[in-house]
Amino acid sequence: MSNQLKKFIAGLPKAELHLHLEGSLEPKLMFELAKRNQIKIPYKSIAEVKEAYQFTQLQDFLDIYYMGMNVLQTEQDFYDLTEAYLRKVAAENTQHVEVFFDPQGHTERGVKFETAIHGIHNALTEVGKELGVTFKLIMCFLRHLDEASAIKTLNEAEPFKHLLCGVGLDSSELGHPPSKFINVFKMAKQQGYKLVAHAGEEGPADYIIEALDLLKIDRLDHGNRAMENPALVSRLANSKMALTVCPLSNLKLCGVTDMANHPIKKMLEAGLVATVNSDDPSYFGGYMNANFESIAEPLNLSIADLTLLAKNSFTGSFLEQTEIDQYLNKIDQYVANFNA
Ligand code: ADE
Ligand code: ZN
């Protein structure tokens, strides 16, 4: 890729809307936390960890992802994880983040909900302020568990509602359609949460339709397989539904085999509010800039395309309109200066 394009991406003000904090756990920190907490992990070296990150489908990754998060035990661990992520993205000029965490991934193994949320939220507040990164926090329900467990988690979150912006749905998609979670999403909406869900990552376009019709989502995570259904694409475009697309994740999990065939350019051409995100950067090989870079050349993206993707990340965010407008102005200024 040209240095010019790389420089443009690096300086572009952007927001990340699809990031699992547990998926930002770098091998080095994994070893440190394993040692600190005397947790056994099945790797001897960082090289061995990286070697294990070979996936052919979502479940291959999830098995390792849930194992990795075992090292997170104390509030300080969650703080350190979140701080490391924020420092990485701030250095890439990511100015706003809307991040996920998986409470059930922790409560199921005996770590308290409050331990996770306090560690994460304190880091977002303190380190975010230091770095000038604004944030929203979203808790995801694990779809391989039953709806009763999701409802229990929603109830556990009640005392911490003021720290949360939304709820989401993640984990093993195939065989766990959005329809399994109608009641808990209805309850969350009544409580004022924003609603998002992973759909169409591996699952069919019908799962996206369920997420829209049955869960009434405000934003769609992934959504790649919407492209198989032209009527659905029109519906998403007309309703200005934001899609949080994750290029390197799609490549690593074999949703696409060649970035030249990644659907994000066709999404933009179809008028979809597509955004670029890293999903689980430690596992998939890169943070925000690497994700932008991974598609820029193979898809022959122009400065205008990249600018649109960055603008979409703010228009698709859960920020107030006045805040969105400020970020959009920043992007316009950046592009004007860059071209000058
Ligand atoms: N949890 C963490 N990353 C995920 C992904 N890409 N899809 C579903 N669940 C996840
Ligand atoms: Zn995800």
Image (cartoon, helix red, strand yellow):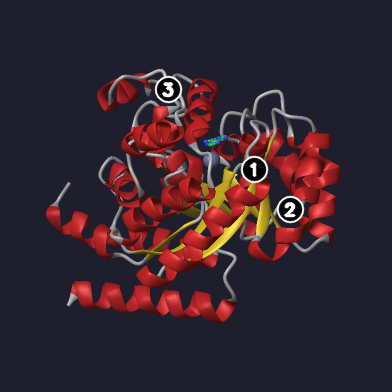
Asked if residue 195 is positioned above or below residue 146 in the image, the reply reads below
Q: Residue at x 53, y 39 (%)?
A: 73
Amino acid type, callout 1: Pro
Which label is found at residue 41? 3
- Which residue is denoted by mark 1 in the rendering? 103
**How many C-alpha atoms fall within 10 Å of the one at disc 1: few (<14), some, or many (≥20)?**
many
- Is ligand 1 closer than 8 angstroms to the Cβ of mark 2? no
SS type, badge 2 = helix
Which label is found at residue 157? 2
**How many C-alpha atoms fall within 10 Å of the one at disc 2: few (<14), some, or many (≥20)?**
some
- Is ligand 1 closer than 8 angstroms to the Cβ of mark 3? no
Q: Residue at x 25, y 24 (%)?
A: 47
* Rendered location of residue 334, percent (x, y): 28, 74
Q: Quadrant of residue 299?
A: top left
Amino acid type, callout 2: Ala
Q: Disc 2 or 1, which lies upstream in sequence?
A: 1
Which label is found at residue 256? none
- Verify CB contact (< 8 Å) between mark 2 and mark 1: yes
